[in-house]
Amino acid sequence: MPDLQQHDNGAISTLLPDGRRWHFQHGPIDLVLRADGSPSDCEAAYAAGWERFPHVLPELVGELPLLHAPLSGKDADPDGPVARAMAEACGRHLPAFVTPMAAVAGAVADEILIAMTSAVTLDRAFVNNGGDIALWLAAGQSLSAGIVMDQDNPALDAFAEIDAASPVRGVATSGWKGRSHSLGIADSVTVLARTAAAADVAATLIANQVNVDDPAVTRQPAHTLDVDSDLGDRLVTAEVGPLSAASVQAALSQGRKVAESMLAQGLIEGALLSLKGETWAVGAAGMQSKLAAE
């Protein structure tokens, strides 16, 4: 592939300075990709990912009204493969309030990874969509994903150590400081799951439940912060001031209950919940792909 390509609809692919990763960008979709294997197979994988990529955003835009609507269990099936994956991942969490948009970043990452790994045989590959990661591991391979718990003080606070024997193929993080609005106050919730779409929606829903009524928490209707928000007039977190230890414990306890329920149902493989410097793990003990503090 040429080091820089631009599709007629504005999608761009760029080889990053390390010479091993690619950056695909189209509107709000911003991916970093890497493939490990023979040079020819990696080249073919990137070409396959790029061939699929420019079509993803137009497909999603064409179904936005459906994707912004809360799922009820009686919904029409979306047409596009990414939209269907979003609805399927989110539908597993009914009757909780959820729209398919809760899985959009993870589902896009999954789709491009499928295109790459369907084309050739690779040792490892990942597609990182703003922190929501789809990954592929051949037998004997492993991957360490760094986790940032506080966007105001970015650092690699922990690592998700994932090997090929694990069912984990998706990592996602959500919280009130993230790209999307949250009903909760978590600084971050990182989830390991079998797909990036599954991890994405689970992280969103757990983060929504890391919550407490406290005067230090400022909330606003979602549409006042983003007129196109799928959350409409629901109150989302706009600011979190200093919290008492009791409030932090209460909020994390709420989130942990939801994460433990998801773990018991097989919806996730593990989660790491962080608020005001305190971090709780769910499902980490004994996992081959464990969340491990550095």
Image (spheres, helix red, strand yellow):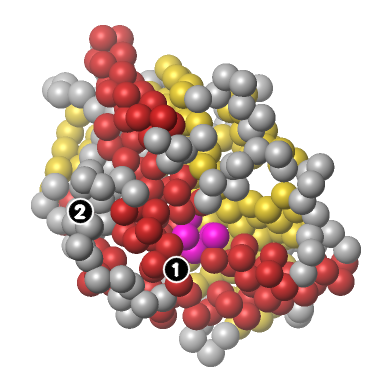
Q: Which mark is residue 157?
A: none
* Image position of 287 with respect to 75: above or below: above
Q: Secondary structure at mark 2?
A: loop
Place of residue 114 in the rendered image (x, y in percent of width and height, measured from the top left): 61, 65
Place of residue 253 in the rendered image (x, y in percent of width and height, measured from the top left): 31, 19
Residue 238 visible within the image: no
Q: Is residue 2 left or right of residue 25?
A: right
Which mark sits nearer the N-terminus, 2 or 1?
1
Q: Which picture quadrant has residue 278?
A: top left
Q: Nearer the viewer, residue 241 or 106?
A: 106
* Residue drawn at point x = 16 percent, y = 38 percent: 219
In the rendered image, which residue does mark 2 sit on?
A: 231
Magenta residue span: 106-110
User: The C terminus lies in which quarter of the figure?
Assistant: top right
Q: Amino acid at mark 1?
A: Val
Q: Is residue 294 left or right of residue 175?
A: right
State how far apart marks 2 and 1 are (Cα): 20 Å
Place of residue 162 in the rendered image (x, y in percent of width and height, measured from the top left): 67, 37
Name the dominant secondary structure of the magenta segment: helix
The question of residue 181 being in magenta is answered with: no
Q: Amino acid at mark 2?
A: Leu
Q: Which picture quadrant has residue 223?
A: bottom left
* Residue drawn at point x = 28 percent, y = 42 percent: 182
In the rendered image, which residue does mark 1 sit on?
A: 82
